[in-house]
């Protein structure tokens, strides 16, 4: 019998996202009246989320912005890369699902959308080209090119800056509103989180060490009726029960929507084993690569009736 | 055409391949130590934890706004 995993409850995800959104904007204390003015520097440390550091209220640096700055200064970003590898190996893309402020925006958009279009899978490679392009374009142009022209999150920097100083031209304001609207429209018409799936360079950066993430989705195939509900609700368009595949390891943001949707509680978000399992333990952990065998309709219906949800 | 088909089939095989749990566990520890080493070198070589010129840098101006 597979071991029961202590799961992280997905009902805490929205509060976690909202709190993180607030934490990223703690630089608001810089804006308090004279006497209350806190000495909060800009970009004190790096955050594992897409968070525009051009924002007047930001106090944590975006790893993508910092990487470009290092590249322009011809310095190797030891700290940023070390930090991202560490985050990737410990929580992986869990940070995208539970902490990222732009993820919160996309989740809200997806709640209001009924469109279910699934673009071709090869489009997922675009985010890796964005990641490589981010470095090449910064090197070639000598400016923070990606943030300036292509980033979905730049709007979080532009609007507070425009509201407080009003020194940004309308051209930039409308340009970034256009970029933001473009990504938002794509996300509205596509099922799930289009930006995270196809474009986000930070997601691409976290997904590579995230293959070895300590936080992972656990699947108990013994209770699974292969009903496909988890696949239907997944915002990243993956099949959650194929936990061992490279695609799942690269793409899963551990948001827990599949955990909530499963009628038989077969899925859980929890810690991965930290030590190599013994032979006996390996046998009990063996999971069919393609999930549980497809069962007849009557069995599925019965399982749904008997299910805990 | 045949080459393209072979490449796409190989890509499909890699994508659907199940990664061994043992390998994952070993590489996880290796990457964990690499990440810590990266941050340590960042501290030692670049004093990067709090990069003063980045902290006082006006990012919006740097982006040309």
Image: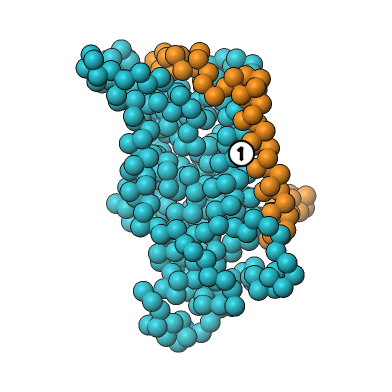
User: In which quarter of the view is residue A205 placed?
Assistant: top right
Image vertical order of residue B26 relative to residue B63, above or below: below
> Residue at left 53%, top 37%?
A202
User: In which quarter of the view is residue A258 placed?
Assistant: bottom left
User: In which quarter of the view is residue A99 placed?
Assistant: top left
Q: Position of residue A1 (x, y in %)?
A: 59, 78
Instruction: Work out which residue is located at the far front of the displayed protein and give it.
Output: A35
Confirm whether residue A184 shows in the render: no
> Residue at left 73%, top 55%?
B23
User: How many numbered discs?
Assistant: 1
Question: On the picture, is A31 further left or further right than B58?
Answer: left
| Chain with cyan colouring | A
Disc 1: CA contacts within 10 A as few (<14), some (14-19) or many (>=20):
many
Confirm whether residue A50 shows in the render: yes
Q: Residue tagged by mark 1?
A: A85
Image vertical order of residue A292 relative to residue A196, above or below: below
The quarter of the picture where the C terminus of chain B appears is top left
Question: On the picture, is A267 further left or further right than B30?
Answer: left
Instruction: Work out which residue is located at the far left of the displayed protein and give it.
Output: A33
Q: Position of residue A113 (x, y in %)?
A: 32, 52
Chain letter, disc 1 residue: A
Image vertical order of residue A202 relative to residue B17, above or below: above
Instruction: Work out which residue is located at the far right of the displayed protein and give it.
Output: B3
| Nearer to me, A136 or A309 | A309
> Residue at left 38%, top 26%?
A58
Task: Name the colouring of the figure.
Answer: by chain
Q: Position of residue A132 (x, y in %)?
A: 62, 31
| Chain with orange colouring | B
> Residue at left 49%, top 49%?
A94
Q: Which secondary structure, mark 1? A: helix
Q: Position of residue A288 (x, y in %)?
A: 64, 71
């Amino acid at each position: 019998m597979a071991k029961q995993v202590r799961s992280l409850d997905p009902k805490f995800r929205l509060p976690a996202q909202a709190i993180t959104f607030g934490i990223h904007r703690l630089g608001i204390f810089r804006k308090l009246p004279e006497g209350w003015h806190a000495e909060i520097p800009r970009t004190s440390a790096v955050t594992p989320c897409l968070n525009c550091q051009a924002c007047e209220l930001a106090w944590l640096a975006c790893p993508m912005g910092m990487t470009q700055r290092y590249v322009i200064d011809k310095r190797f970003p030891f700290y940023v890369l070390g930090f991202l590898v560490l985050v990737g190996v410990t929580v992986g893309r869990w940070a995208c699902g539970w902490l990222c402020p732009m993820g919160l925006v996309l989740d809200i958009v997806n709640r209001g959308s009924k469109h279910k279009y699934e673009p071709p899978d090869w489009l997922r490679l675009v985010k890796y080209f964005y990641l490589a392009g981010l470095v090449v374009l910064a090197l070639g142009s000598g400016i923070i090119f990606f943030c300036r022209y292509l980033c979905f999150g730049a709007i979080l920097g532009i609007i507070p800056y425009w509201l407080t100083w009003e020194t940004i031209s309308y051209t930039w304001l409308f340009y970034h509103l256009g970029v933001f609207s473009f990504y938002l429209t794509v996300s509205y018409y596509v099922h799930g989180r289009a930006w995270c799936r196809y474009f986000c360079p930070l997601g691409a950066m976290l997904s590579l060490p995230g293959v070895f993430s300590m936080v992972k989705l656990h699947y108990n195939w013994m209770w699974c009726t292969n009903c496909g509900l988890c696949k239907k609700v997944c915002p990243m368009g993956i099949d959650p029960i194929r936990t061992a595949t490279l695609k799942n390891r690269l793409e899963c943001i551990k948001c827990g929507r599949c955990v909530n949707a499963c009628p038989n509680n077969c899925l859980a978000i929890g810690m991965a084993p930290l030590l190599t399992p013994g032979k006996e333990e390996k046998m009990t952990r063996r999971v069919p690569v393609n999930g549980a065998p497809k069962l007849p309709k009557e069995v599925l219906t019965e399982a749904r009736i008997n299910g805990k949800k | 055409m045949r080459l393209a088909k072979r490449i796409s089939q190989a890509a499909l095989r890699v994508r659907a391949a199940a990664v061994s749990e043992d390998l994952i566990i070993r590489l996880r520890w290796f990457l964990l130590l690499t990440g810590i080493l990266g941050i340590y070198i960042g501290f030692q070589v670049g004093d990067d934890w709090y990069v003063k010129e980045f902290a006082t840098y006006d990012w919006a101006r740097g982006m040309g706004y």
